[in-house]
Image: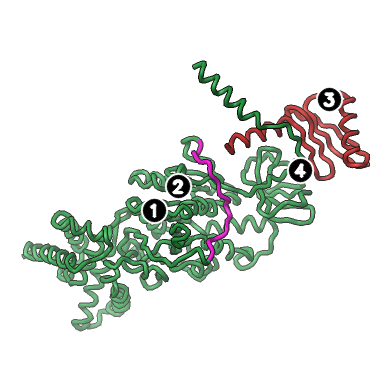
Chain colours: A red, B green
Amino acid sequence: MSKALLKIAGSFSSDDIDKITKGFEKLLGRQIDFEIVEDSSLIGGFAAYINGKVYDSTVALQLKNIRRGFLKD
Amino acid sequence: MDNDFKSIGTFLKEKLKKFEYTPKEYEYGVVKSCADEIARIDGLPRCRYGELLEFGGSEYGIALELRENAVDAVLLNKSGTVVPGEMVSQTGRVAQVCVGDGLLGRIIDPIGRPLDGLGAVPSDEFRPLESHAPTIMQRTGVNTPLETGILAIDSMIPIGRGQRELIIGDRQTGKTSIALTAIINQKKDDVFCVYCAIGQKASSIAQVAAKLKSVGALDNTVIVASTADDCASMQYLTPYSGCAIAEKFMRDGRDALIVYDDLSKHAAAYRAMSLLLRRPSGREAYPGDVFYLHSRLLERSAKLSDEYGGGSLTALPIVETMSGDISAYIPTNVISITDGQIYLESELFNAGIRPAINVGLSVSRVGRSAQYKAMSGISGNLRLDLAQYRDTAIFAQFGADIDESTASLLRRGERLTELLKQARDIVFPLSRQVAVLLSYNNNHFDGIDLNKVAAARDGLLERLESSIGDTMRSIDGSGELSENDMNILTQASGAFFEELKNAKH
């Protein structure tokens, strides 16, 4: 079982966290033990830090992408 | 008004259509320790050298030491927000700076943030701070002069566009003044200037900006500044950033001049960074690659061939010596990299000879071929005259009896030294330089009291301007001294000195 960090924005239900954990276990093919941290700067969504990699699905990242896209045009 | 809001709304909607919700997967590292603006990071196994790293979304650093599964990076700010345990992510970019005409007249820091309180810098083009120098095939020989407006330099140590000419001397010998005069003189020639202030006092930078503004030269100048208060990494990046900005002008087929003020402070900042990164130190505690630090910077100056637009980038690096010691590590390095040096001496400066150029130790290795014909025709023996005078003057000090030819040599030398004195920020266009040297060659100044030589020179120039202004313009325009122009000039100056002589009696 590998240790990992799950950053979430606001409070998630334990069902949601279970779903996320299952999803990652399926994706990576091994058991994962998430330490849960609440971080409001993510605005929404979650980011999983597993073994040197971030799986980022936060609103903060999406906003940053939109900002970059605007600056580029 | 409502219409405006509506159109903004549709514009934004249109833009946002392109965006899709896409989760992202990337590597991250964790700050292990952080001290003196150096962060040691665990992780980031695929980080590239020089890559920009993002610390917790607000702070940035540059990866400068890559190890297996660990990275050392220098932080770009002294915000103190980076703490152990902080997440670090790669940006996939190297440090870059905005470039283009929008920067002219602005003062920015090495990563393009405005320092002059005039709002964001209007530019949408970026260049990486570090880039390759033009290749051999892209270059051509230096063939156009870059006038500094300083008689002593343009006549004896001429600088060509695309050349690298070092300005070296102790503190308070007028190094920055020479560079600023050169910048001021580019106003008329469409040469774009970049002034890099590296680790200087904020007050000095303010003075430089005020000076350039007061004479209207700031409009074609960009000032890239890091102050003594900025961290070593910022000071380290300053010249590369300025060079990237100047390179853009060159690549667009225009002419640019860049002043690095000064590279000794740059080397000191790099030494601080290297020592903190625990790199092995060598001579004077500088790291092994301190030569490469400056050679790769100065190699980016070039004169491009016509196929590549024919632009040029001239560099005037400045190096400060300690009590005239040009054999210290950094001075010898930069002397060997550049195409010549202008050596300033504090003894000359204190004796009132300003600019305090030591003609014997100053050289220009390529500029001669780029000198204007009008100037090269009449400045040929100046160096020899001056060198002979300096040698002889030492012996004459002992009060020995001197023959007539030696006395004449001394007399001419004294007058030449007087003629080469030039007040700060006063620039002499080519025609005026030619007029002064022509009168000197014709021995017109020999009969004038030493303390009246400068006044006679100024009087002569004033007279020529009013009597043969058209000829002066044509010399400036063509860069050549036709026989006809020469005759007019000789006659007009002859008449002036004749009058001066008669007025005395």
Q: Nearer the viewer, residue B266 or A68?
A: A68
**Chain letter of the residue beneath label 4 in the structure image:** B
Q: Is B172 colored magenta in this rendering?
A: no
Above or below, B300 against A25 in this view is: below
In the image, taking residue B302 as reference, residue A32 lies left or right, namely right
Q: Secondary structure at mark 4?
A: strand
Q: Nearer the viewer, residue B401 or B380?
A: B380
Determine the CA span between mark 4 and mark 1. 45 Å
Report the predominant secondary structure element of the magenta stretch: loop
The image's mark for residue B191 is 1
Is residue B74 visible to us here? no
Above or below, B5 against B280 in this view is: above
Q: Residue furthest top?
A: B2
For label 2, the crowd category at 10 Å Cα-Cα, with few meaning under 14, some 14 to 19 and many 20 or more, is many
In the image, taking residue B98 as reference, residue A2 lies left or right, namely right
Precedes in sequence: disc 4 or disc 1: 4
The image's mark for residue B26 is 4
Chain part drawn in magenta: B120-135
Above or below, B365 against B405 in this view is: above
Q: Is B134 colored magenta in this rendering?
A: yes
Q: Secondary structure at mark 3?
A: loop
Q: Residue B291 at x, y = what percent?
A: 58, 65
**Chain letter of the residue beneath label 1 in the structure image:** B
State the residue at coordinates (24%, 67%). B437
The image's mark for residue B222 is 2
Q: Amino acid at mark 1?
A: Val
Q: Residue B222 at x, y = what percent?
A: 45, 47
The lab-note entry on whether marks 1 and 2 share a chain reads yes
